[in-house]
Amino acid sequence: ERIAGEQSEYELDTTGPALKRDPNKCILCGRCVRICEEVQGVSALQFTQRGFDSIVTTAFDLPQAEINCVNCGQCATVCPVGAITELSEIEKVWAALEDDSKHVLVQTAPSIQATLGEEFEMETGTVVTGKMVAALRRMGFDKVFSTDFGADLTILEEGSEFLKKLNGEGELPHITSCCPGWVKGAEHNFPDLLKHLSSAKSPMQMFSALSKTYYPDQTGVDPETIYTVAVMPCTAKKFEKDREEINGSDFKDTDAVLTTREFARMIKEMGINFTALPDEDFDELMGESTGAGTIFGTTGGVAEAAVRTVKEKLTGEPLERLNLGFRGINRAEVRIGDRIVKVGIANGFKNAQKLLERVRAGECDLDFIEIMACPHGCVGGGGQPRPATNEKK
Ligand code: SF4
């Protein structure tokens, strides 16, 4: 009680673009500080002494929106008391679903289908795609689509751009840009390397722009009435959707982002018996995709999909599996025609920084680099079920 009382005396702006902190709930366990510093290498949070007490705060008590936080949300996954959580958009989405004048579309990211089941006491890794689609229909969404559709488009863009750079138009290494946590980290820490980042939007934003342009063209639905929700493994996507420069449809491309945890909470609020749901398919038009989009959900997947696209375009031959695996930094070499293409991945922001220091120093011979801000990529994202959900089992 004393700690709670002391902390609430300080008027801290603890709400950021993707996450919010409640100092009154904090028990000073330090898990958020450690994961931010030791695992992610960001150090956006720290212990600060106030009189006889410590509090967790940002450097100089700056507002969350003004610090070097990459919004990856790893702090929220380890907080045992809910003192750090995603900025919830559940109420906004319920309001849209209850508004008869709105045509509400939803897209789900590839990794959700392998993690959502954990929130319903299912075995880790159980694929629940059909039940997830069925739950979204029962919640009232007018169309249920897959972000894999957007991921396929991202790969075509990113692959074509990489091909141009291989042919001398632009600087190598070509670095992925689909992770908004990594992009914000690059802006803070590696502004000199931004020219290496792909200009392709993330799959979520590509899908959302099409949901307000291509979708109404094909269906006749008034784009003014379309409300697009994205279910993501990610807290940084909440920040990404509000970036002014990224909206391209003349409307707000993505209206709301729900994390996997928020989505599960809504299913529970509805009283849906998730495990008993039948399997249903995504809606057509923007619900179909290839395997390239699906592997975006895990580390190495974007690199593999991009190099596969380039190899097939140039030689007509399929790519053997790259198996870049779950190591922090890994590399592989692929023969494409008479050239050896060197591909690397870094997962987790700390590993990304180590690899990029080598790029900066001119000591890196890689042609293509995939960077994901979260350990193991989006399957380990900051919006995924908390490990505690499994510990309960
Ligand atoms: Fe979001 Fe995935 Fe990047 Fe993590 S790795 S910040 S979940 S896009």
Image: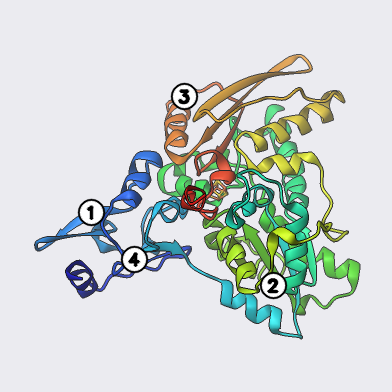
Q: Is residue 389 above or below residue 21?
A: above
Residue 236 rendering spot, x and y as whole percentages: 52, 56
Q: In the image, which disc is placed on residue 362?
A: 3
Front-most of residues 236 and 343: 236
Question: Looking at the image, is mark 2 or mark 4 nearer the viewer?
Answer: 4
Helix, strand or loop under label 3: loop
According to the picture, the residue beneath numbered tag 4 turns out to be 63
User: Tag count in the figure?
Assistant: 4
Q: Circle 2 sits on which residue?
A: 251
Q: What is the CA distance from the residue labelled 2 to the residue labelled 1? A: 41 Å
Indicate the amino acid at tag 2.
Answer: Phe
In the rendered image, which quarter contains the N terminus?
Answer: bottom left
Mark 2 lies on a secondary structure that is loop
Q: Nearer the viewer, residue 121 or 143?
A: 121
Q: Are marks 3 and 2 in contact (CB under 8 Å)?
A: no
Write down the quadrant of residue 103 in the picture.
Answer: bottom right
For marks 3 and 2, the one nearer the N-term is 2
